[in-house]
Image: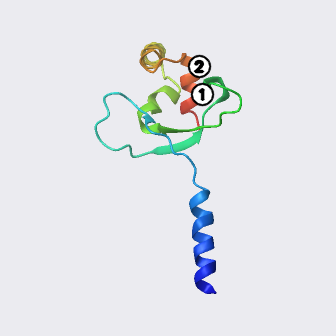
Amino acid sequence: MLYRWITLLLMTVSMCTVAMPEQCIQLPTRTEPCPHLIYKKMPRSLQATKQDEPLVCVCLTDFDALLKVPKNEVERVRQQMALRQLSEQMQMTPNQLLELVQY
């Protein structure tokens, strides 16, 4: 009897798996594992259809500099340039990239 319950439980758990993202949003230059990795729902602005609710993996460590408040004008310009360059590499708008890396 116990064996049947365990088997049923294992079958139920195996059917309730969540599709994990195949790759993470991270800097193209990253070679080491990300120390601050999160999984979150993909923002609606990046979803192909309204029914999709895929998970996306984000290496937050790689995008810390984009989220910090610049201390002066030079830092602000560098931050904007980095944002523009990264968003082009990842084929999304700067606003979409910011929405994705904010937590």
Q: Is residue 31 found left or right of 101 in the rendered image?
A: left
What is the x, y in percent for residue 23? Answer: 43, 37
Q: Position of residue 100 (x, y in %)?
A: 56, 30
Which colour scheme appears in the figure? rainbow
Q: Mark 2 and mark 1 in contact (Cβ < 8 Å)?
A: yes
Query: Residue 102, how many percent across, how many down?
Result: 57, 33
Secondary element type, mark 1: helix
The amino acid on which the numbered mark 2 sits, given as a three-letter code, is Asn
Q: Which residue is mark 2?
A: 95
Foreground residue, 3 or 48? Answer: 3
| Residue appearing at x 46%, y 44% in the figure | 37
Give the answer, above or below, for where 51 lies relative to 15. Answer: above
Q: Residue furthest left?
A: 31
* Residue type indicated by callout 1: Glu
Q: CA distance from mark 1 to mark 2?
A: 6 Å
Residue 99 image label: 1
The foreground one among 88 and 9 is 9
Q: Is residue 55 above or below residue 44?
A: below
